[in-house]
Image (tube, rainbow, N blue to C red):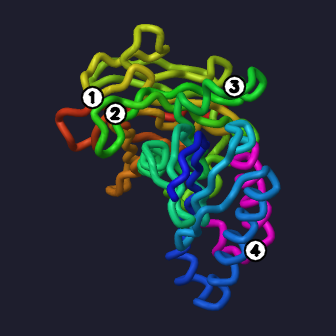
């Protein structure tokens, strides 16, 4: 007989395993992936959750208490960092995407169904590398101390839903962690002290490391305001730590980076890359898309 109850639904998706099989070989890669998913399952049980099913390189779990799901998500990310550190070099490509939503679910033959399941699953499309995203339904049920660990993002339009969804991101010690970048041939860019941002052909504005973080978006409250319909109110964020500038997308339409002298475009969707040299930043579309807002950036190195 179907059983209905309120639960927090979590999806944890391990990505990067395809490249892992190519770099490590089937046997070693399978061992790393299996061990990782097994550890994630142990973390769920430790925080009084229940694994509903494993999904290839990930899992679906439910928790009676939202705060237990949040603590489990945090420990999962920390566990993955330890696994990557202690595994063969190819495992560094592994990233963990975690999402959670709260609501009534129906349990049938060991599986779970309901709106919270659908929302948590579709929210994975918007998660960036090693991010934990939760819906407002989870956030509202957290204790004050737990809420302070989250940052509110722009409302997202989830696949198959009419109304946008308010989403929050767990801050995982971002000042200490090395942000991800899609370019590996610039392993040691020079220490940076300033960045110049210019919209179209304007002279631009220089932001020093002391003035970080810099918010870019449509809102007048942003340090660098861009009036364009494809730009979110709080579209992107530039931070300075460990001697470098890092650009993080927190928008609905994405942020796109093309470095001078490199034809490839870095696509950021809730992800981060290290800025170096100079180039173009497309807000809401690729730099070649005339509908997107186009920023010119230049890193000003210390003398």
Residue 109: % across, % down: 53, 66
The 10 Å Cα crowd at callout 3, few under 14, some 14 to 19, many 20 or more, is: some
Q: Position of residue 176 (x, y in %)?
A: 76, 41
Q: Residue 33 falls in which quadrant of the image? A: bottom right
| 43 in magenta | no
The residue that disc 4 covers is: 87
Task: Say if 261 sits above or below 56 in the image.
Answer: above
Q: Secondary structure at mark 3?
A: helix
Q: Quadrant of residue 174?
A: top right
Q: Earlier in the sequence, mark 1 or mark 4?
A: 4
Of residue 116 and residue 39, the one placed in the foreground of this image is 116
* Residue 27 in picture, x, y percent from top left: 64, 91
Q: Which residues are magenta?
A: 71-93
Q: Is residue 155 left or right of residue 77?
A: left
In the image shown, does 244 or 268 lie closer to the viewer?
A: 268
How many marks on residues?
4
Q: Using a 10 Å C-alpha cutoff, classify the residue at mark 4 as few (fewer than 14 neighbours), some (14 to 19) or many (20 or more).
A: few
Q: Are marks 1 and 2 in contact (CB under 8 Å)?
A: yes
User: Residue under circle 1?
Assistant: 230
Asked which secondary structure carries label 1, the reply is loop
Q: Earlier in the sequence, mark 2 or mark 4?
A: 4
**Residue 147 got which mark?**
3
Q: Earlier in the sequence, mark 3 or mark 4?
A: 4
Residue bearing mark 2:
283
């Amino acid at each position: 007989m179907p059983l209905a109850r309120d639960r927090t639904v979590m999806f944890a998706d391990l990505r990067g395993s395809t490249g892992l099989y190519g770099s490590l070989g089937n046997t070693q890669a399978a061992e790393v992936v299996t061990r990782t998913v097994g550890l994630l399952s142990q973390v769920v049980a430790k925080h009084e959750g229940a694994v509903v099913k494993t999904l290839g390189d990930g899992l679906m779990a439910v928790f009676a208490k939202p705060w237990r799901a949040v603590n489990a998500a945090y420990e999962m990310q920390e566990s993955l960092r330890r696994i990557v550190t202690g595994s063969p070099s190819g495992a560094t490509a592994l990233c963990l995407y975690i999402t959670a939503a709260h609501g009534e679910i129906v349990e049938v033959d060991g599986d779970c169904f309901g709106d919270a399941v659908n929302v948590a699953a579709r929210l994975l499309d918007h998660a960036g590398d090693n991010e934990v995203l939760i819906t407002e339904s989870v956030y509202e049920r957290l204790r004050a101390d737990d809420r302070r660990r989250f940052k509110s993002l722009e409302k997202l339009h989830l696949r198959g839903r009419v109304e946008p969804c308010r989403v929050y991101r767990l801050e995982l010690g971002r000042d200490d962690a090395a942000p991800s970048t899609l370019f590996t041939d610039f392993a040691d860019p020079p220490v940076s002290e300033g960045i110049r941002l210019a919209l179209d052909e304007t002279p631009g504005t220089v932001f020093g490391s002391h003035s970080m973080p810099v918010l870019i978006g449509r809102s007048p409250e942003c340090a660098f305001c861009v009036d364009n319909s494809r730009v979110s109110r709080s579209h992107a964020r530039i931070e300075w730590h460990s001697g470098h500038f890092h650009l993080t997308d927190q928008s609905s339409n994405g942020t796109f980076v093309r470095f001078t002298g490199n034809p490839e475009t870095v696509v950021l969707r809730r992800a981060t890359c290290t800025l170096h040299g100079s180039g173009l930043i497309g807000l809401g579309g690729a730099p070649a898309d005339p509908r997107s807002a186009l920023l010119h950036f230049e890193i000003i190195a210390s003398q």
